[in-house]
Image (spheres, rainbow, N blue to C red):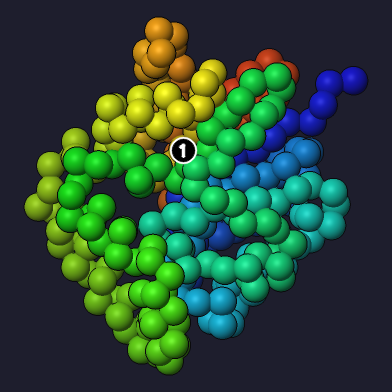
Amino acid sequence: MNPLPLLFASDLHLSDSDPATEAAFMAFLAGPARQAQALYLLGDIFEYWAGDDDDDPLNQRVAAALHALSQTGVAVHLMHGNRDFLLGEQYAKVAGATLLADPTLITAFGRPWLLSHGDALCTDDLPYQQFRALVRQPAWQAAFLARTLAERKAEISRIRAASQLAKQQKASDIMDVNTFAVAALLAKYPGAHLLHGHTHRPARHQHEVQHGLRQRWVLPDWYAGKGGYLRLDIAGPTLVGINQDATWA
């Protein structure tokens, strides 16, 4: 009997403004995810995260659904994205999940796989990398989380508005991963293939690293009830569409 698959998803951007995507995710957790040995959510699970003390009903519903999945024996893993990097151990515990560092190396079906959200590889976007370095500092996070929840949400709204404006002024290629950054990362992990999200450009790429070819699989985003995930089993990786009987080539 073949071992159960591992499932990977990212960039759901769950929010009250997109109930169709929440419904699709809940159906995924109650369906395909229950036929897996583990589920890895590689960042930007939520549109934003103001802190584990934010008891928004959406946050509670997602935690309850993830916990219910974990109770069936499926291991649930969460990784920070650029939207929900403040998600902490308190929420992970309620959700029955474990938090992963970025990057994280796992071995599955006889091969090493390197997991990442992917934003750290977008090194051509220098303003974003400066912002990322700032907000990932423990001192910055402690000071931010010490503010009231209302103040935090107001600041997040301001940052998101500024980010949307900045994106409109950036060339699209600088918001994709830098191939040299990918090669440098993979060189630290001999033989590993890379799996990440963030760029919203689902595909399979190949990179020559250390005189060999490595695969880089990019996860799709979710929006308006459509999305997808990567299924990794004994036959290899496959990108699968949600709410459509299609597989990405």
Left or right of residue 33, residue 246 in this image: left
Instruction: Give the quarter of the figure containing the N terminus.
Output: top right
The residue under the point 45% across, 62% down is: 85
Is 47 rendered above or below residue 1? below
Q: Position of residue 71 (x, y in %)?
A: 84, 57
The residue under the point 40% across, 89% down is: 147
Dot 1 falls on a residue whose secondary structure is strand
Residue 27 appears anywhere in the view: no
Q: Position of residue 196 (x, y in %)?
A: 46, 38
Mark 1 lies on residue:
196
Q: Amino acid at mark 1?
A: His
The residue under the point 44% across, 79% down is: 142
**Quadrant in which residue 161 is drawn:** bottom left
Is 51 rendered above or below residue 137? below
- Which of these two is toward me, 9 or 19? 9
**Quadrant in which residue 180 is drawn:** top left
The residue under the point 59% across, 51% down is: 100
Residue 67 appears anywhere in the view: yes
Q: Position of residue 42 (x, y in %)?
A: 53, 47
Left or right of residue 46, residue 91 in this image: right
- Which of these two is toward me, 34 or 49? 49
